[in-house]
Amino acid sequence: MTTTAKNHKGEKPGEFFVITALFSRRLAYPLALLCRRAGLSANAVTILGGMTWVLSVPTVLLAGRLWSRGNTVAAGWVLALSCVMWNMGYILDVVDGSLARMTDSSSSGGYFLDYSFHLIFHPMFLCSVGLFLFMVTDHLLYPVLALLSTCSGWGVSFHAKEHVLCEHIAKNEVDPAQMTGDQRYRIYIDSIKTKTAATEKTGRGRLTTLIRELFCFPGIYAFVTLVIVADLLLVKWLPRSFFLLQLSFIVLTVVPLARMPFRLRREFRTLEFYDEIR
């Protein structure tokens, strides 16, 4: 197998996310080198990053408990630790792929582990933030939105479609190789966009994509962290505790919930197109 110089550096060809290409990938490379020297496998890094994400949930809930009891200093430090864990988990999520390319150890099992932690933690993230806000404010709106947020992401519609497609392949009812490349991408990956590498995006297109990524994966962890930092720094001037986080949380949960019917319709239409060509 021929390995390019870029793969030696652990770079991902055609990186899709702008925030990853501009920031996370630059941090991932030296960390991947350290992991390789330490003898860690890519799968071990995946599990480490995933568990960092998962363990941030009780950490942020502990911060909420401490704040509700008036121990705001300790709560602030624990909340800061939660922010570090969110972002470190994502950086390690990039490191594992870089390490796999460095060591030529990419595998379907590794991809499965990576994807599993995404599906486990993404719903838990906003849910834990909502429960934190409930502990801090005692408003019932936040646990309700927290619960609803667990089913508002891309996982529901995409994986329902994925199940249908995989079942057809398993039953030998369709051969994806008979489709054109554009058809396969539209059906199996993204039904409305043509994949454009982050490095190919410039100017307004790159800025628009970067802003969009801050409100969903992968930039949501950095965005919520910045909001929390602003809340803590401006606590004397804001009308109530975590005012900016409350506003942000409402937007981050209500907008995906409002989009969910349209996302389901999009994938339904993708399957209608799929039925026409298979």
Image (tube, rainbow, N blue to C red):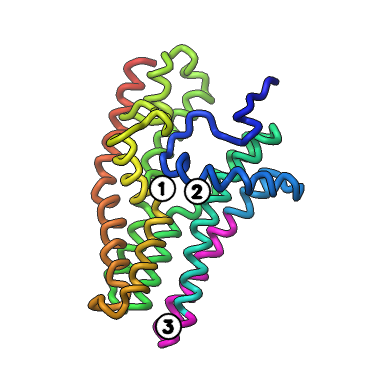
Q: Nearer the viewer, residue 235 or 266?
A: 235
Residue 135: quadrant of the picture: bottom left
Residue at x 30% of width, y 57% of height? 253
Report x, y in % for residue 180: 41, 14
In the rendered view of the protein, which quadrant contains the C terminus? top left
Disc 2 residue crowd, few under 14, some 14–19, many 20+, Cα 10 Å: some
Q: Earlier in the sequence, mark 3 or mark 2?
A: 3
Amino acid type, label 3? Thr
Amino acid type, label 2? His
| In front: label 1 or label 2 | 1
How far is mark 1 from mark 2, CA to CA?
Answer: 10 Å
Farthest bottom residue in view:
70
- Range shown magenta: 50-74
Farthest top residue in view:
178
Residue 89: quadrant of the picture: bottom right
Magenta span: predominant SS is helix
How far is mark 3 from mark 1, CA to CA?
Answer: 29 Å
Report x, y in % for residue 219: 40, 50
Determine which residue is flagged by label 2.
Answer: 118
Q: Earlier in the sequence, mark 3 or mark 1?
A: 3
Residue at x 47% of width, y 39% of height? 21
Disc 1 residue crowd, few under 14, some 14–19, many 20+, Cα 10 Å: some
In this rendering, position of residue 241 left or right of residue 104: left
In this rendering, position of residue 95 left or right of residue 257: right
Q: Nearer the viewer, residue 213 or 273?
A: 213
| In front: label 3 or label 2 | 3
Amino acid type, label 1? Phe
In the rendered view of the protein, which quadrant contains the N terminus? top right
Q: Earlier in the sequence, mark 1 or mark 2?
A: 2
The numbered mark at residue 167 is none
The numbered mark at residue 72 is 3
The numbered mark at residue 217 is 1
